[in-house]
Amino acid sequence: MTGTITGALLSFLLLYKYWALFALEFISALGPPLPSAAALVASGMFASQGYFSLALVLIAGFLGNALGDISLFFLARRFRKSILRFLKIKEKGNSGFIGKIEKYLYSHSWITVAASRLSGAGSPAVSALSGISDMPAATFVTAAIAGETVYTLLYAFIGYFVGVEWEDISNFALPAIIVTIAIIAAFFLYKDSKKR
């Protein structure tokens, strides 16, 4: 199964090149669990072999991720009331888990957004929560751009310098995501226990 997905990803990238990379990164930033990190690593590998331009890989990957993040943020901001109504959460005086997240995002917004870009799967959740919260748009945009710059450079250069071993390296993405989520959850639980 993994071989089929990997083969399809490679074929898609080779056929549509930078447009495919842009589309994968953009859609993944909106939430669907697509192999965006693997796509960047594979594109970096193709660049090392002369099939792609490394500069265009970096541009397509960065723009896809950054525009996806910003789009999700503004969609969440635009439909804030509908989302809160759907989740049965009061807009003002919100207590409970969502309220704690909103309070945390307000006090640690820049570093949370920037660091979440590296977590892959956690990134869309932070983008959506940031849009629903009162986080200033300029703060979100600058933090997302900084985080996506690091994310794009990291994965594209892994592919570029590691070359044909990219699939083995990209297999570390899922454990990295799980560890990141566990660290964030542990941090929230620790902060909550200190307040009691």
Image (tube, rainbow, N blue to C red):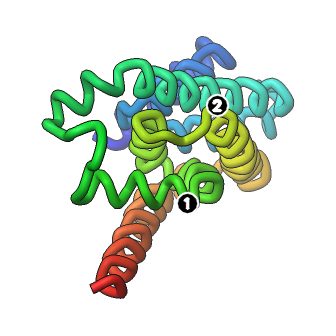
Front position in the image: 68 or 52 = 68
Query: Disc 2 or 1, which lies upstream in sequence?
Result: 2
Amino acid type at image mark 1: Ser
Amino acid type at image mark 2: Ala
**Vertical placement of residue 62 versus 160, above or below:** above
**Vertical placement of residue 156 versus 158, above or below:** above
Residue at the spot 34% in from the left edge and 83% down from the top edge: 195
Name the spot of residue 187 as percent of width and height, x first: 41, 76
User: Residue 152, labelled with which disc?
Assistant: none
Residue at the spot 29% in from the left edge and 52% down from the top edge: 98
Which quadrant of the figure has residue 174?
bottom left
Furthest-front residue in this view: 93
Which quadrant of the figure has residue 13?
top right
Name the spot of residue 27 as percent of width and height, x first: 47, 24
Q: Secondary structure at mark 2?
A: helix
Name the spot of residue 95 as percent of width and height, x first: 24, 56
Q: From where the camera sits, is residue 163 visible?
A: no
* Picture quarter with the N terminus: top left
Residue at the spot 46% in from the left edge and 31% down from the top edge: 28
How many numbered callouts?
Answer: 2
Relative horizontal placement of residue 164, taking residue 95 as reference (left or right): right
Give neighbour class at mark 1: few <14, some 14-19, many 20+ (Cα, 10 Å).
few
Q: From where the camera sits, is residue 54 visible?
A: yes
Q: Which is closer to the viewer, label 2 or label 1?
A: 1
- Which residue carries the number 2 mark? 66
Q: Secondary structure at mark 1?
A: helix
Front position in the image: 141 or 69 = 141
- Which residue carries the number 1 mark? 107
Relative horizontal placement of residue 173, taking residue 22 as reference (left or right): left
Relative horizontal placement of residue 28, taking residue 39 as reference (left or right): left
Give neighbour class at mark 2: few <14, some 14-19, many 20+ (Cα, 10 Å).
many
Residue at the spot 68% in from the left edge and 45% down from the top edge: 143
